[in-house]
């Protein structure tokens, strides 16, 4: 799932029609929002859709009943229906994004929509993306929208902290 989220981020930046290094540089200059949908093939066909906000190493994805927050250091995955939250280290987003750029193909950008295919070399997963309603805004210092306030969730949530 982490790889899929980061691939989505890279596709957002690829929408600008930039080269690999320019795409990575745009992370620190823009806050990007969009609607997304993607289909995976491994272990079997699954389709996901929702909304995304990305800025630098920070992102917030919501869709399919799950919310994913990342402030660049920690990632919170919340399932409100199950009342569960998993907290993990964010990992190295830039290395994953560079790998994405190496294995992506068929990226097409028209207006404020983008489609593309990523062939994951680790598991032969073919991920087909559709991003729409893409908007670029100036980045801000306020990253509060990328952090989940676990304390505000209440005692009925189960929080599992997997950070080391």
Image (spheres, grey):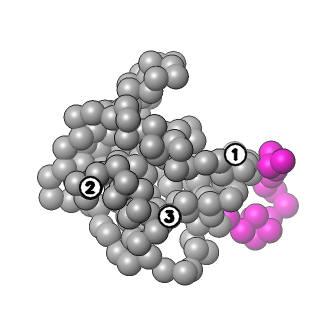
Q: CA distance from mark 3 to mark 1?
A: 30 Å
Q: Which mark is residue 125?
A: none
The quadrant of the rendering that contains the N terminus is: top right
Considering depth in this image, is 120 or 101 the residue closer to the camera? 101
First in sequence: mark 2 vs mark 3: 2
Disc 2 crowd, CA 10 A, few/some/many (<14, 14-19, 20+): few
Disc 3 crowd, CA 10 A, few/some/many (<14, 14-19, 20+): many
The residue that disc 3 covers is 56
On screen, residue 127 versus residue 158, left or right, reads: left
Q: CA distance from mark 2 to mark 3?
A: 16 Å
Q: Position of residue 149 (x, y in %)?
A: 72, 68
Q: SS class of the residue under badge 2? A: loop
The quadrant in which residue 52 appears is bottom left
The residue depicted at 80 percent of the width and 68 percent of the height is: 151
First in sequence: mark 3 vs mark 1: 3
Q: Furthest residue to the front?
A: 21
Residue bounds of the magenta highlight: 148-164
Q: CA distance from mark 1 to mark 2?
A: 40 Å
The quadrant in which residue 39 appears is top left
In the image, residue 123 above or below residue 79: above
The residue depicted at 76 percent of the width and 70 percent of the height is: 152
On screen, residue 154 versus residue 105, left or right, reads: right
The residue that disc 2 covers is 18
Q: SS class of the residue under badge 1? A: loop
The residue depicted at 45 percent of the width and 43 percent of the height is: 98
Q: Nearer the viewer, mark 2 or mark 3?
A: 2
Report if the CB atoms under discs 3 and 1 are less than 8 Å apart: no
Q: Is residue 157 magenta?
A: yes
Report if the CB atoms under discs 2 and 3 are less than 8 Å apart: no
The residue that disc 1 covers is 82
In the image, residue 124 above or below residue 1: above
Number of on-image labels: 3
């Amino acid at each position: 799932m982490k790889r899929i989220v980061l691939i989505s981020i890279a596709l957002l930046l690829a929408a600008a029609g930039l080269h690999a290094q320019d795409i990575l540089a745009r992370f620190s200059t823009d806050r990007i929002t969009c609607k997304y949908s993607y289909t995976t093939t491994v272990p079997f066909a699954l389709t996901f859709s929702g909304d995304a906000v990305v800025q630098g190493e920070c992102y917030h994805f919501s869709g399919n009943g799950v919310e994913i927050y990342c402030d660049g250091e920690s990632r919170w995955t919340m399932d409100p229906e199950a009342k569960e939250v998993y907290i993990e280290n964010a990992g190295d987003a830039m290395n994953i994004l560079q790998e994405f750029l190496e294995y992506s193909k068929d990226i097409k950008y028209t207006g404020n929509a983008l489609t593309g295919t990523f062939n994951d070399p680790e598991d032969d997963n073919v991920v087909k993306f559709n991003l729409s309603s893409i908007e670029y805004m100036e980045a801000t210092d306020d990253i509060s929208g990328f952090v989940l306030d676990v304390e505000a969730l209440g005692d009925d949530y189960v929080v599992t902290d997997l950070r080391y």
